[in-house]
Amino acid sequence: MTARSEIERTVTILSEMEKELDDLKLEVEDMKRKLIARVKEEAEKARDEAIIEIQTKAQAELEKARQEAEEEARKIITQTRGEMEQLKAKIDRLFDRAVDTVAKETLKVSE
């Protein structure tokens, strides 16, 4: 082999290596784009899952608070009804006394 053919062979090999490097560079850039897209997709998926979980927990807490408020309202209503019944009974007793007192006073004045 001559020096010239060795040089041509070396240039050819270097050109092929440069082409392979360019191809690898393009492949790496493509893989990088795919990886970035995948990371974005997974991040959105994680965000959506977190939002759903937070909403579910919030709804559960709201439901619990609603049930507690309803139970408290039932207790207040029950207590109030009892107090109203006691008040009505007291009014009835006092009314009867008042009628008796008015009747006695009226009879005293009439005599």
Image (cartoon, grey):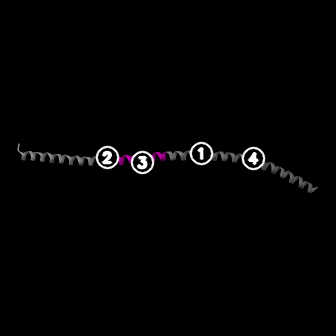
Give the Cα distance between marks 3 and 2. Answer: 18 Å
> Disc 2 residue type?
Leu
Q: Earlier in the sequence, mark 3 or mark 2?
A: 2
- Circle 1 — which element? helix
Query: Viewed as shown, does residue 103 lie left or right of 35?
Result: right
Residue range of the region highlighted in magenta in the rendering:
36-56
> Disc 3 residue type?
Arg
Would you call the spot at circle 2 few (<14 residues within 10 Å), some (14-19), or many (20 or more)? few
The residue located at (86%, 52%) in the rendering is: 101
- The residue nearer to you, when weighing 6 against 62, is 6
Query: Viewed as shown, does residue 58 lie left or right of 80?
Result: left
Give the Cα distance between marks 2 and 4. Answer: 76 Å
Mark in front: 1 vs 2:
2
- Circle 4 — which element? helix
- The residue nearer to you, when weighing 78 against 25, is 25
Q: Which residue is denoted by mark 1 in the rendering? A: 68
Q: Which residue is denoted by mark 3 in the rendering? A: 47
Q: Which residue is denoted by mark 4 in the rendering? A: 86
Q: Earlier in the sequence, mark 1 or mark 2?
A: 2
Taken as a whole, is the magenta stretch helix, strand or loop? helix
Give the Cα distance between marks 1 and 2. Answer: 49 Å
Task: Please identify the quarter of the rendering in which residue 67 is found.
Answer: top right
> Disc 1 residue type?
Glu
